[in-house]
Image (tube, helix red, strand yellow):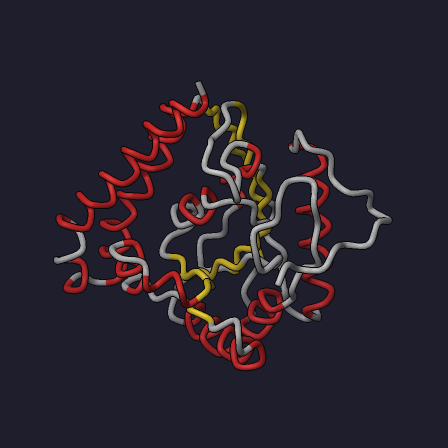
């Protein structure tokens, strides 16, 4: 049954991308940035609803009232493709830090280019870090929120890697709050397998973490502690023990 549901889901997924590519991409470059986000995010709205309808997923979303009125740095754990789609809708307009190769995907990548992402060449880590810090601060000052996955890559449920503090550094330099987000999307939409699984998908937005007068290390430690504590509560797959050393990021 899950295989059939997943096949139906991907039929709708591809058709929606083709339709949006024909109808939305041509006018998008001529729209103001906020209007461009609203138009292109219609695809994201469809995918989130289609996934729930076809794959038997129940959403449990909490903490939206905690989102600040102005721009912020959103720090989320990263388990699957689902959160890359949904978090574009959380606090728009939002600029995502992502790997540069995604911009080369037909239609999907073309749309991403129009949303002012920070696209990194991960083969040049020193240059990528400088790019994140410079462009991230500029995006915040321009009124966009910045979405960063501090784990740096998709991490399967039940595993843990070290968090990168670049998002906290950006927030501290710009004087903007950090908003932690925790979810268990990888248990419903596996990051490395195409078959989707029914059940509860939980996502919670944490209280904003102020950065004024604080170091990036302090801010990042608080954000990571909140995310990991929430993951321990909402995850079906047990989290590693707190005393256990996080594994290294996959190459």
Which residue is nearer to you in this view: 140 or 186?
A: 186
Quarter of the image for residue 162 reads bottom right
Position of the N terminus by quadrant: top left
Question: Which residue corresponds to the image point at 18% horizontal and 55% vertical from the top-left?
Answer: 25
For this orientation, the residue located farthest to the top is 1
Q: Position of residue 201 (x, y in %)?
A: 53, 30
Image location (x, y in percent) of residue 221:
73, 59
- The residue nearer to you, when weighing 58 against 161, is 161
Left or right of 231: which side holds 189? left
x, y percentage for residue 223? 67, 54
Q: Is residue 212 above or below residue 42?
A: below
Q: Nearer the viewer, residue 185 or 194?
A: 194
| Label tally | 0
Q: Image quadrant for the C terminus? A: bottom right
Residue beneath the point at 27% across and 41% down: 14
Q: Residue at x 62, y 57 (%)?
A: 151
Position of residue 236 in the picture relative to residue 56 (left or right):
right
Where on the picture, by quarter, is residue 248? Answer: bottom right
Q: Is residue 9 left or right of residue 3?
A: left
What residue is at 73 percent from the left and 50 percent from the top?
225
Residue 95 locus on image (x, y percent)? 41, 61
């Amino acid at each position: 049954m899950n295989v059939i549901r997943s096949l139906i889901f991907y039929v709708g997924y591809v058709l929606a991308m083709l339709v949006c590519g024909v109808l939305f991409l041509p006018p998008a470059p001529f729209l103001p940035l906020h209007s461009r986000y609203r138009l292109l995010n219609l695809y994201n709205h469809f995918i989130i609803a289609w996934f729930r309808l076809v794959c038997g997923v129940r959403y449990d979303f909490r903490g939206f009232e905690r989102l600040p009125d102005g721009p912020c740095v959103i720090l989320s754990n990263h388990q699957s493709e689902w959160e890359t789609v949904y978090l574009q809708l959380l606090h728009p307009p939002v600029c995502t830090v992502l790997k540069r190769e995604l911009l080369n995907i037909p239609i999907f990548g073309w749309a991403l280019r129009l949303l002012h992402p920070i696209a990194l060449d991960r083969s040049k880590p020193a240059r990528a870090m400088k790019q994140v810090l410079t462009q991230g601060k500029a995006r915040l000052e321009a009124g966009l929120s910045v979405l960063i996955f501090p784990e740096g890559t998709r991490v399967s449920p039940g595993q843990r890697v070290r968090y990168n503090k670049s998002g906290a550094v950006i927030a501290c330099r710009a004087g903007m709050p950090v908003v932690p987000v925790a979810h268990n999307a990888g248990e419903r939409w596996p990051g490395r397998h195409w078959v989707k699984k029914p059940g509860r998908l939980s996502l919670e937005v944490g209280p904003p973490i102020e950065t004024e007068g604080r170091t990036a290390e302090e801010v990042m430690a608080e954000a990571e502690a909140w995310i990991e504590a929430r993951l321990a509560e909402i995850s079906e797959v047990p989290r590693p023990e707190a005393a256990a050393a996080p594994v290294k990021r996959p190459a």
